[in-house]
Image: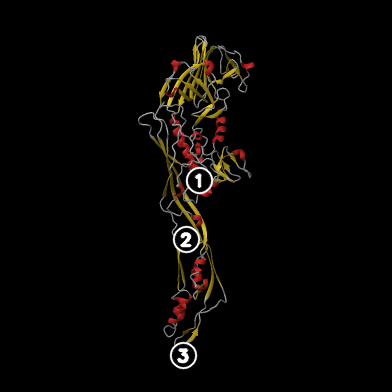
Amino acid sequence: MTIYFAWVGVEESFNPKIHCRDDQQVFRLDIQQREGGFALARIAIANPKCGLLNYKRQRHCFIAYHNTLLFKGRVVGMPVQVNGEIVHLDFSAEPEDSQQRLLDLQKQLKQAPYWDELFVSEEGQDDPVEVLEARSALYYWCRTTGEVSISDIFNGQHHVNLTDKFFRNSLKFAVNEVPLASISIEVIAEWTQRAQGECDIGHLIEEKFTRGLVNTLTGVDLAVKWWRTGEKVGHTNYKVVQSDLQEIEHLNPQTSSAVWSGEDANERSKIWFKRHWFKTYLRLGWSYKQRRREVACFTLNHATQPLAQNNGKTRRLRLYLQNIVGENHHWRPYHRYTPKFHVVYKTAVYTCIKRHQSSDVFADKFWQQIGRSGHISEQAHRASFFLTDRGMRAINHAIEIARSHLAASARAISIKIVGEFDLLHQVTTDHSITIQDDRLPGGKVTGKITAYRIYVDGKTGHRHVEVTLAVAIGAGAKSEDRVDATETYVDNTFCAQPYQAFTKWQLQQPKGGIIHPLSLSAFDIVRKVTVENDAKAQNQHLLQNQYPANQDLKSVLSEVPTNVRIDLADIGAVETLHHEINIDLHDAWSAPKQINLLA
């Protein structure tokens, strides 16, 4: 048995001329690894009769076969078993900087449509499981380099066409759980729609008067009653932001008609009342706030080969989005920040990664960018989320989640084989294997390695490799059903490959509340302007009530002061408004057809 074992330093690189040596005589070797995990090696060696964890000793090793490196790892503890002069040691291929390597890979994987921060809680943003939620892939840790990557669950980066070169009696065929028939998903967005603006409504008042200018015989009274800047109007959602009445002099007619006034016929005289002309300035500010809940629903069907009479169930998922509007704070100088605190700086959202007090300059070393801030201010005023380009991104991500769930269930067949060491000693969980056997449906199967065991016994000379394969029973249809983004209203800059799936769901507009608040104009917020007793009406009243009917015409005029009333639209909030969007996915999704069950 040409198995070499060398104690090495953590930074050493394998060199067969140097490391193919026998620092320890290996009597037995057992290397195992499962999908997503680290490879483990157990060796049987002569008892070194020393503390293996002594800081002066090297704790890492290379295990090689001829000139090929089989395993690189570090001893994980004291001997797990002592049998006379033989001890069994366990080694792990986990690198010492595994967490940093995983974090670096996660950053690369956070790309749409397979990643969307809105689906992940703040504390889960760096969870290695979350970044794979929408991918049909698992982490792969190389047992010889310690490098981490992702490996597709159907097809590894490497392939071995084993044909029938395995031990015939080792073949084991098993049916796992029946694949899902479909998956139904509800994506739920909840937010408070917020908007504010200003409208000039002075012109709506002026058009109710002669010549388009406010005119009255009771100008002083009108000026006293006119709205003041800062005053709330009608409903509490309105406030006067600018108000003014500018009197215009020397505009004809400057007075009322001549009317008689006096106590008797001998003392009567003609008098005139001044007619006041005003240019008005009245600008209202408004604010709108409405709680909304929007649900996007779809079902993705799964095209598989029939495996059982009851061919699968429907899985139902309800996915709640995080704060789609955002409550992030703008970065401030000379402020104390703690880890995981979010800020907006320029056009991006950052999370604090190290406790510090900010200076007058934003320091990148304390922050990690986690997204763009564009949707924060833009979404706040919208009545719909899923009918926006950002909402489209969320739906595409949800479809990828649905696809990954179907993919995981599609590997319904498990096959185990044992093969010759020389043929299979380099296999990993990033390998696919094709085998041929007349006992298998169709006589040929390709599967992805989910687990393996490399075993060598120096005493008996027996050596072999055990492999477990996961086999997908897809129907053979194309697994992608996407078209050019121009078939939807969504900005092409986001999706290079959006799903075709959608019917005209963008026509399912919300109906409650104010849909486009930022487009509100004076005509939207002012329902009616009522003017009572303009100058013409006041003049007529004076003529009808002059001497001898009345002696005090000032009192007569005070009976008909000019009043302006504005009836404003109620833009106050109601209970949470619900809106459901139903998305029809045209085509079923299929995993690869790795076995022909109908042959």
Q: Nearer the viewer, mark 1 or mark 3?
A: 1
Q: Say what secondary structure mark 2 lies in.
A: helix
Residue visible at 43% across and 37% down in the picture: 588
Q: Locate residue 227, reporting x and y percent.
A: 50, 66
As drawn, 204 above or below 90 = below
Amino acid bearing label 1: Glu
Q: Residue 525: give its label.
A: 2
Q: Which residue is mark 3?
A: 266
Q: Earlier in the sequence, mark 1 or mark 3?
A: 3
Amino acid bearing label 2: Ile
Q: Residue 487: give its label.
A: 1
- Left or right for 548, reference 228: left
Observer-nearest residue: 367 or 346? 346
Give the Cα separation between the discs numbered 1 and 3.
Answer: 90 Å
Quadrant that contains the N terminus: top right
Residue neighbourhood size for the residue with mark 3, other residues' Cα within 10 Å, grouped as few (<14), some (14–19), many (≥20): few
